[in-house]
Image: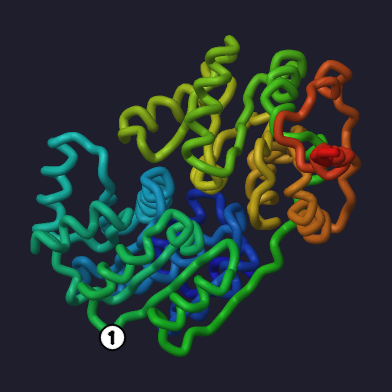
């Protein structure tokens, strides 16, 4: 479907055409008419499908046709990085319009905070925010959203995974009941449906089948026990010839620990996590994008918040809990028809997760043979070893009867 068929505002359409966009993606083709019709919507679509344009374009079109529009739309995002990416798209799409936007997130300096305050007093069309910092502005009375027309929750599943449920519900208490609410989520677990039932009114639903990993990805798995993971990965990183690597771990604590371990082993690596301040996070990402940092370690938040070309290796240090997250993670490599490698370390507890992944991607992944020196490493806490060990016979001592 051609973007001209949506009858967008001429200035908005001019911005689209100037950026080289002509045809809508499947999620845009389905979502844009629903949002233009001012219906609530819950959509399941992953990163890379054009979902940001699917809600930005119709909302920006409605803003351009609204005379009294300050603080018209609030977009909630789980991370600063995603909020910044959304704002960049707004800036590009609104080049020929007079639509204004503001990003609100923590970690900035005093100057940025004063700029936020001034913009809030004057009013803007679009506010793109992370939940925590937005609550502080709402609670202080500096920001008023009682006339809000549109609420968008982007990557809603990730916000819940990061523990933002209470923050989201508190923000909702500052918003008018009569509004249009749009929710985008890469996955649709029960907790998302429960939240959607509370926030949306008679929503229409769109669900796009998750796309399969790119053909250019060489998917590999190693069957290991936990104390083989670091030695194996160290060996692969040192000898594989990879130049740009992302390592995904299951928790923030494990991310931090891996950063220390890799640096202790002489590997140039940085851990990317929420305890870093904004400047530290931006500096690490920029260094990684500039290919000055070869190894970046993070959780699943990173799989949806980073857009870097030329990543040639993705490592799942832990198998992700959801099969969809596996696709998100390895999708960081082999982009734009290039080739890349995805390596997943699978222990005995992860076999069911692996089965779910293979079912989703509709193919079996053949395990790689462990290097001999790694295979020789004995498990310290190995369930199989304990299970197969022959039980020791208890000696029974009988007291000799006195004659």
**Image quarter (top left, top right, bottom left or bottom right) of the C terminus:** top right
Residue 40 falls in image quadrant: bottom left
Report the side of 197 relative to 345 (left or right): left
Q: Residue at x 22, y 59 (%)?
A: 135
Whether residue 184 is situated above or below residue 291 in the rendered picture? below
Look at the numbered disc 1 and give the secondary structure of its residue: loop
Quarter location, residue 224: top right
Give the residue displayed 69% in from the left and 45% down from the top.
319
Q: Which color scheme did the rendering employ for the protein?
A: rainbow
Image quarter in which the N terminus is found: bottom right
Q: In which quadrant of the rendered view does residue 308 lie?
A: top right
Q: Is residue 166 left or right of residue 366?
A: left
Instruction: Say which of 165 and 28 sits in front.
Output: 165
Q: Position of residue 101 (x, y in %)?
A: 27, 55
Say above or below: 88 vs 237: below
The percent position of residue 190, horizontal first and vertical second, equals 56, 74
Provide residue 193's location: percent of width, then percent of height. Answer: 52, 77
Residue 240, percent from left and from top: 76, 18
Which residue is tagged 1? 178
Q: Is residue 182 left or right of residue 341?
A: left
Q: Is residue 342 something that shows in the picture?
A: no
User: Which of 142/249 is in front?
Assistant: 249
Q: Determine the residue positioned at 90% across, 29% down.
A: 369
């Amino acid at each position: 479907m051609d973007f001209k068929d949506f009858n967008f505002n001429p200035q908005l359409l001019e911005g689209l055409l100037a950026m080289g966009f002509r045809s809508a993606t499947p999620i845009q083709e389905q979502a844009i008419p629903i949002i233009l019709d001012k219906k609530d919507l819950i959509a399941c679509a992953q990163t890379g499908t054009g979902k940001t344009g699917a809600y930005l374009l119709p909302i920006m079109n409605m803003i351009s046709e609204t005379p009294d529009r300050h603080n018209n739309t609030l977009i909630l995002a789980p991370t600063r990085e995603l909020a910044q990416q959304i704002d960049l798209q707004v800036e590009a799409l609104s080049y020929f319009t007079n639509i204004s936007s503001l990003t609100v997130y923590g970690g900035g300096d005093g100057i940025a905070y004063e700029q936020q305050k001034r913009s809030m007093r004057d009013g803007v069309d679009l506010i793109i925010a992370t939940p925590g910092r937005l609550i502080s502005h709402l609670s202080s009375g500096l920001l008023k959203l009682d006339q809000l027309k549109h609420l968008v929750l982007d990557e809603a599943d990730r916000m819940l995974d990061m523990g933002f449920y209470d923050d989201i519900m508190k923000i909702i208490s500052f918003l008018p009941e009569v509004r249009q609410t749009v929710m985008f989520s890469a996955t649709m677990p029960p907790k998302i449906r429960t939240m959607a039932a509370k926030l949306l009114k008679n929503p229409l639903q769109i669900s796009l089948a998750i796309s399969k990993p790119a053909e250019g990805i060489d998917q590999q798995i190693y069957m290991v026990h936990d104390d083989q993971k670091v030695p194996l990965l160290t060996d692969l990183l040192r000898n594989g010839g990879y130049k740009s690597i992302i390592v995904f771990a299951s928790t923030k604590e494990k991310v931090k620990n891996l950063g220390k371990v890799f640096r202790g082993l002489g590997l140039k690596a940085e851990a990317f996590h929420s305890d870093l301040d904004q400047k530290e996070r931006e500096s690490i990402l920029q260094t990684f994008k500039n290919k000055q940092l070869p190894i970046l370690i993070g959780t699943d938040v990173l799989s949806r918040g980073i857009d870097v070309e030329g990543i040639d290796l993705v490592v799942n240090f832990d198998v992700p809990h959801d099969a969809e997250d596996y696709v998100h993670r390895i999708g960081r490599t082999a982009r734009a028809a290039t080739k890349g490698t995805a390596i997943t370390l699978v222990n005995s507890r992860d076999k069911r997760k692996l089965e779910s992944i293979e079912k989703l991607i509709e193919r079996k992944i053949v395990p790689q043979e462990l290097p001999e020196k790694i295979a020789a490493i004995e498990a310290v806490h190995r369930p199989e070893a304990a299970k197969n060990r022959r039980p020791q016979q208890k000696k029974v001592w009988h007291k000799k009867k006195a004659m």
